[in-house]
Amino acid sequence: MMPIFFHLESHLWIAYLLLFNGWLLSLLLRQRSADFNELTKSFEAQILSAFFISISVNGIFLLLLQLLGQPFSLMHYIIPTLTAIWLGVCAVAGVRFRAILDFEFSLGRAIFYLLIFVILFYNGGLIEQVSDAWWHMSLANKIGIASSFELSTGHLTGLPSRYYPPLWHGNLALVKELSGESLPVIWNSFTAWGAVLKVMAFYLFARALTDSKSVGFLAALLFFVLPGLGNSYMRVSAWPSHIAYAAWFTIFFAVFTTLESRRPHDKLIGFVRTNFSSLLVASSAVLVLLVDIYFLHKAEILYLALAFLFYFWGLLIVSTLVSKKRGALEPSSDLLGAYALVFMFAIVTLIVYRNMGSAAIEWFSITNLIPAVLFLTFIVFTVGADDKGVRAKQAVLIFVLLLVLASILPQHIRALFDTQYSSTARVTGWFGRELIVPDWSRQLREGFLWSGLLSIPLSLYLAVKTPSKATVFLASNACFAFVLVASPYCYHWLTETLNYHSPWRVAMLVFSPIIFAQFLQYLIHLKRSPR
Amino acid sequence: MRQLLVNLTVVVTILFVAFEASEKFDRQLVELKLKHFSDQRNWSFAFSQEHVYSSATFRYKADLEAFERLVHVGSSVLSDKATSYHLASTLPVYIVNVHQHQGRWMRRSWTRFIDDGYFCYPEFAENRARIFSHLAAHNDVQYVVVNNDPETRHRSRDCLSFRSESLRAELPEFLTLIHAGEYLDLYHIH
């Protein structure tokens, strides 16, 4: 018979090593910066900042030990010393007990997170099967043994192995070293913590995007209960990719909170100048999270970049089709436009660089026509003024969007619904060439059928009926992400451009829980104000 | 009329969400997944730590601690796939029986050796001859671990489990039992 409460010690170590020191540091930062205090005023933001500061600081000290050729076991002394230093600095800086309790609290949300913790505590991590979890634990084990992030041989077989970002594995090795617990125990225990962190981050993201606590809460609830793609799987919350998802959602939160609460300004330079302090704090937080993601799993940096690109494309489409200024929908559209231009030029440069020489002619063939036309159109639209040549722009945009829709092959869509019809890794496109398509059975079918798929028209409906920052962001991400996996031309291009083994994960940009939450809010609003 | 439509849409949306969320409460789905060794990646009210405890390494703690004192750092171990991963994540050892996408192709000879089943059934003369020639030609593995745990589920997909007695009896010239644990036996390859 299993004990009802087990591995208590590992939970206490996780709380100390992966939260406490970071929390002390975030207290100090809140004391020093009103903008950071504002950014982390909710208890979710405080817990997430404590976690990400903790794993970053731990990673820095582990790296220092590696560079100095010292064993990781020295962390037995370093971690308590850091705790003493942060406590001392807090005392000297005059951090008061009242400041510690100064955060926005909600009993309902706290009970919800506690419920998630309890459920995942009793569900445990996915280690009853031979999953990739064991591969990650093996890497953490060898990093701890070697006291180095750079292993001379592959951690699993002893033969050369691919590089994997090691920040999370280093932190796991640290918990193992200091707690004396085995990695499977730590992994199993952390799953409950990781799930709560991820849902908290999703709540903050949804709340900041929609500017509504109730929509944020409902979205977090739906994120927990609805079937979705990989990021919603809770029993794998201790995987490095899921730590990166939490960081990814937190970046959305930091960006939308900062852009929403700032004073608008006509010009980009003026906007930056008038909001310099808050932008600096938000940029620093985003930079730390980006560095974390780079050393956790990397791919989320691309999803983040694409999310804001698609958002800007959505703004361009709405402003063109309804003849509305971009700034009316998103006061920071200039900032977004500058980012989108840089990102699009970076992608074009990368493609040109990769395909220089004889391959260039092949690349600029009919296969890449759709993405090339999309990019060209949006670059021209971004550079151009909002109010010039409106009719011509509308015609071009409608033509391009129809072209993209036409590039979706019916047999590929049919394979989503009909498993018997599925699924080859390649299909023949309209113009004859074999194109790579995603295998729907890789999380995509579960993610799309049915909530994921239904959320796409719902998001479009919301964007048309109530165009706003949130609805345009959700609709543009849902539609473009779906097009990327549904159109063989776009998916083929994405696969070749990214050189990544799972480009289909871009479908995670269909944020269906937020779409459903917002749709329900819209319906409730209709009920209350019938006209 | 409009209000009725709105009310109807609210009800339909809530019912749809409830329908989609119902898999989290589906006991049959969990049992089906367990039966077919399918990963239970998402949480479920029907899933519990009992399933994790029966197949994770928690119960092997004493055996693994004993192994840690006996094995050489950096040595390689042959075991069934599941146990191999457990060993790699706990001990300072490497493993040779791994999944395809995690470097299995690099351990081609050992993979074939296990998959063909010769090593698991040394009581047959033909297999013994193959085992002798293989072990004589490949000296990059120092230990064999046999999992005798009757409860763990996924080891049944690998023939090496449960063959401890047979290996001990049939291959004394190659294998020496250096630790007989509660669940795991550790052999040294000569």
Image (cartoon, coloured by chain):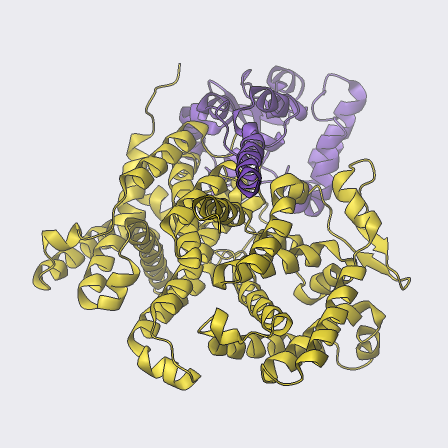
Chain colours: A yellow, B purple
Q: How many numbered discs sit on the rendered protein? A: 0
Left-right relation of A21 to B65: left
Left-right relation of A184 to A351: left
What residue is rendered at 41% in x and 49% in y?
A216
- Image quadrant of residue B8? top right
Farthest-out residue, right: A432
Looking at this view, is A22 or A38 the one in front? A38
Left-right relation of A46 to A31: right
Q: Is residue A172 visible?
A: no
What residue is rendered at 56% in x and 43% in y?
B2
Q: Is residue A267 visible?
A: yes
Looking at this view, is A324 or A242 the one in front? A324
Looking at this view, is B51 or A175 the one in front? B51
Question: Residue A455's spot in the image, x, y percent?
Answer: 60, 47
Quadrant for the C terminus of chain B in the image: top right
Vertical placement of A98 versus A371: above or below?
Answer: above
Left-right relation of A503 to A267: right
What residue is rendered at 72% in x and 20% in y?
B121
Looking at this view, is B44 or B90 the one in front? B44
Question: Residue A268's spot in the image, x, y percent?
Answer: 43, 83
Question: Residue A458's spot in the image, x, y percent?
Answer: 60, 50
Quadrant for the N terminus of chain B in the image: top right
- Image quadrant of residue A353? bottom right
